[in-house]
Image (cartoon, rainbow, N blue to C red):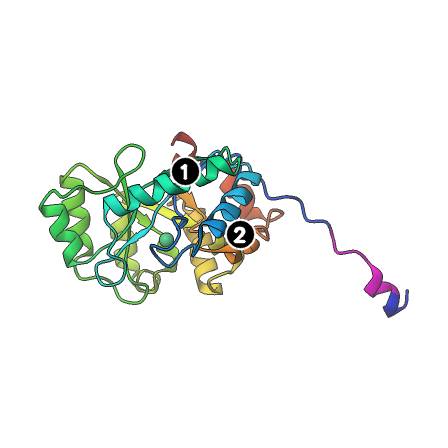
C-alpha cells in the first residue's frame, strides 16, 4: 500500500460515548454568563444536547461561588437555572436540570458556614467544595469539620488536580481516613489536565477512594475531550465496576 492509499483510509470509528451507567452528572458550569463556564444560552443548550446524547438522565450544574471572582448567590443561581430549564424545554431537551454550586473554601466561606447562611446542596445534603490548585488552604480541615458539624456532606471536587495533595501524602491519608467524599473529573483520565493528574486519578481509582464522577464541563472542548475517554483500557473497566453515588441522585 502506497502512502496515498494510507491517506485515503478512513479514521477508525470510535464508539459513541455512553454515560447512561452514570445517570447523573453533578459537576458542571452550564448557567450562562455567571462564571467561567458557558458564555451564552446557545452554548449551554448545545452542551446539554450533547450530554443528553451521552445517555445522561440528569445534570446538576454547579456554578462557582468564589468571593473574589464569582460573587454568585443562591438567588442568582436559582434565576439562572429557571432560564436554563425554560430554554432547554423549548429546545426539546429532556434531560432533567438542577443546580447546586461549587464553593471555594476560604475564610469567607467558613464564615457563611458558621453563620448558618443558606448553602446550595444536592442529593442527600452533599455540598461540592473546591480549593486552589497549588497550595493547601490553611483552613481546609477546619472548614470540613464545620461543614460536617452543620450536617453537610462535603464533596471534595477533583482532588486529583490538587498539586498540594499529590505531594503531601500525609494529608491525602488523613483525608481518606476521615472518609472525605472525593469527586473525580472523568476528563482527568484522558490526560486533559496533565500526565501527573492522570496518574494521580488512576491511583485514587485503584484505591477505590472516589465516590462521585463529574464532567466539570465548562465549554465544548471538555465534551470533545470526554469523547476520547479511553474505553478499552483497564482503568475504564475499573470505573464501570465501581459503584457511584451519581446513579442514586
Ligand atoms: Fe468545577
Q: Is residue 82 above or below residue 136?
A: above
- Give the left or right position of residue 232, taking residue 248 as reference: right
**Among the two numbered marks 2 and 1 on one chain, the one whose residue lies closer to the N terminus:** 1
Indicate the secondary structure of the residue bearing disc 2: helix
Q: Which residues are magenta?
A: 5-12
Q: CA distance from mark 2 to mark 1?
A: 20 Å
- In the orientation shown, which residue stands out farthest toward the right? 1
Residue 186: % across, % down: 47, 49
- Give the left or right position of residue 75, taking residue 249 as reference: left
The numbered dot on residue 205 is none
Indicate the secondary structure of the residue bearing disc 1: helix
**Residue on which the image places disc 2:** 223
- In the orientation shown, which residue stands out farthest toward the top? 248
- In the orientation shown, which residue stands out farthest toward the left? 115
- Give the left or right position of residue 139, taking residue 243 as reference: left
Q: Nearer the viewer, residue 240 or 5?
A: 5
Res. 10 image quadrant: bottom right
> How many residues crowd around disc 2 within 10 Å: few (fewer than 14), some, or many (20 or more)?
some
**Residue on which the image places disc 1:** 85
> How many residues crowd around disc 1 within 10 Å: few (fewer than 14), some, or many (20 or more)?
many
Residue 171: % across, % down: 26, 57
Amino acid at each position: 500500500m502506497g502512502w496515498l492509499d494510507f491517506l485515503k483510509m478512513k479514521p477508525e470509528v470510535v464508539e459513541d460515548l455512553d454515560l447512561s451507567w452514570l445517570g447523573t452528572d453533578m459537576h458542571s458550569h452550564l448557567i450562562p454568563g455567571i462564571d467561567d463556564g458557558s458564555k451564552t444560552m446557545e452554548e449551554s443548550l448545545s452542551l446539554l444536547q450533547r450530554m443528553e446524547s451521552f445517555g445522561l438522565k440528569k445534570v446538576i450544574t454547579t456554578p462557582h461561588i468564589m468571593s473574589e471572582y464569582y460573587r454568585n448567590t443562591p438567588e442568582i443561581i436559582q434565576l439562572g437555572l429557571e432560564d436554563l430549564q425554560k430554554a432547554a424545554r423549548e429546545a426539546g431537551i429532556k434531560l432533567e436540570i438542577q443546580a447546586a454550586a461549587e464553593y471555594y473554601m476560604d475564610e469567607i466561606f467558613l464564615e457563611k458556614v458558621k453563620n448558618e447562611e443558606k448553602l446550595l446542596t444536592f442529593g442527600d445534603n452533599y455540598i461540592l467544595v473546591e480549593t486552589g490548585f497549588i497550595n493547601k488552604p490553611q483552613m481546609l480541615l477546619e472548614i470540613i469539620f464545620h461543614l460536617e458539624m452543620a450536617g453537610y456532606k462535603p464533596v471534595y471536587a477533583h482532588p486529583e488536580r490538587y498539586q498540594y495533595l499529590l505531594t503531601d501524602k500525609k494529608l491525602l491519608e488523613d483525608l481518606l481516613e476521615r472518609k472525605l467524599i472525593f469527586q473525580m473529573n472523568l476528563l482527568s483520565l484522558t490526560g486533559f489536565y496533565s500526565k501527573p493528574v492522570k496518574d494521580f486519578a488512576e491511583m485514587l481509582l485503584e484505591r477505590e477512594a472516589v465516590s462521585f464522577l463529574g464532567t466539570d464541563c465548562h465549554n465544548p472542548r471538555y465534551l470533545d475531550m470526554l469523547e476520547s475517554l479511553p474505553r478499552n483500557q483497564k482503568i475504564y473497566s475499573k470505573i464501570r465496576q465501581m459503584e457511584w453515588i451519581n446513579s442514586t441522585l
